[in-house]
Image (spheres, rainbow, N blue to C red):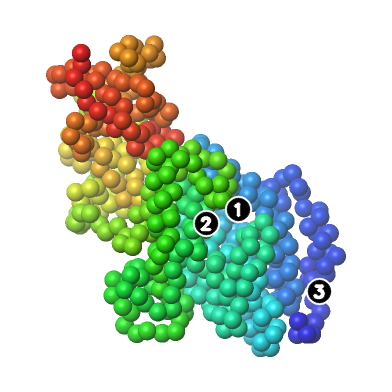
Amino acid sequence: MGGLFDKQSGHPLADKRELQRIIGELPADNAFKALDEIGIWLDSLLAGGDLPPDRSFDAACQLADAAAPHLRRLAHEYLHTPRLSRAEESRLWSIHSGFWSSFADVLERALITFISRKPTAEQARQMLPALCTYLIGALRTLVKWEQFRYGPPPKEVWRRLGQALLATEAVGVSAQPVATGVLLGNTSALTEYRKAVIFQAASMDSLLPMEIELAECFVSHFLASFDFLDTAEHDCVYWLDLRVGQPPQRLAKMPEQLTPTQRFYRPGAGHGKILAVLRDLERGGDVPPEINLGGQYPVKTLLPVLRHLCAYLAPVPPQRRHDRHRVRHQMQVLHGLVNSFVVFSKEFGGQSLGLQPDAWQVDNVSRGGFGVVLNEPPKDWLRVGALLALQPAGGENWLLGCVRRFYRGVNSESRIGIQTLSRQVEAAELTPLRQGETTGAGAVPILILLEGNLPGEVRLVMPPHTFDSRERFEYMLQGQAVIFESLLLLEHNSDYEIARYRLLPAA
């Protein structure tokens, strides 16, 4: 750097040998302890204001490289352990969020200090590509971890992202490739920024954390096929201003004033390529080997993710299907298939039988469902996909719903979007049949949805891993003996499955 940063520092990480010793002594077999120590050292870089920006950046990157394998292992545990307690989930989330927040803060401090020293154009071209790529990648990853908990993005994150990208654009290095190793891969500042834009445009708040991770993998693979423009075209869908701290906005109309720092996005060929993979999987094909998802996943796990991306990254993103009306009333809420089975069972007469329902405040309703505002911390079971039995205050009938959106706001406030699955539900215990004979398996507790079905069909809600395309059920439905013949598994998670069945007359 031509002597620009030759000031000596008393910080231990300023010495390369000491830095290597510190990294070498990190515990290799204890991810929690290693990441805790790395976090302390990152915080010390923020406190050590006399450390030159190039040394601070280099030290932070080496600490991040040491953290990477531990972060990957704990992220896998967070995303793939089916029954994490709230405390375990919170601990894993806090470790990742804390790391990426501290890492980004150190890099941003280095960037601000570097620019304040008025480097030459050559010094800027040497320093900024890697520094800003790491910074934008860290902020983008922090946004993803906030999305895992359906929280608001970190404060001013879009202003910070924009400033970092503008710094590289000022010297013409925004697209310069940077090899970040295992932390972010081979990428650039512009690539990382575009990933953040598409991630935001994909509206992930209706996906589970593992589905969010998979969606990000698909976005990364198809990123080059989406168009990012400096000027608006008629088919652009989103726009943003690099100098303004706001996320991408729907391009319902042109901005009032056009500026050089505005950027515009359209799906380009990206939507069609994602749709082609979806159609191939629906026909029984496999994921193309060049798409790196970080592991092998069953098709039924990937289909909801691809359908979501096809909908929200389309040339015309989804519009609200039903008008929303403001209301203020309470609902009694029970969660899970077992509790729902109790209240819909004729045996118990629609009573909760000593169960303790939660009281939720409904904020708005539409034909498809309703929105709820919670002014208290959400309970452990509350997440996207949670099955709910709901009863309006003062009413006697229950309805079945499902959490489709979950947004964790500030001051313990959460906003929940609930889809109504059916207002007419029967609980039954059905024995599977194959070729007209019982399978010998025990009776299965099932909820029969009698509303919102296609003609000649019915939907069943059943325990996880119950659906079998070879099996049928016999049932006395509304006084008539019928056969439920399996058609399609609509959705599944760790608590329940929903499948379509054809109605046939019993022999």
Left or right: where 72 falls relative to 219: right
| Residue furthest out toward the left | 479
Q: Position of residue 319 (x, y in %)?
A: 27, 59
Quadrant of the rendered structure where residue 13 is?
bottom right
How far apart marks 3 and 2 lie (CA) works out to 44 Å
Amino acid type at mark 2: His
Residue 10: give its label.
Answer: 3
Q: Would you name the residue on which mark 1 appears?
A: 95
Secondary structure, mark 2, is: helix
- Give SS at disc 1: helix
Q: Which residue is mark 2?
A: 221
Q: Is residue 396 above or below residue 254?
A: above
Query: Crowding at label 2, few (<14), some or many (≥20) Cα neighbours within 10 Å?
Result: some
Residue 157 badge:
none
Instruction: Give me the C-alpha separation between circle 3 and circle 1.
Output: 28 Å
User: How many numbered marks, from 0 up?
Assistant: 3
- Camera-side mark, 3 or 2: 2
Q: Earlier in the sequence, mark 3 or mark 1?
A: 3
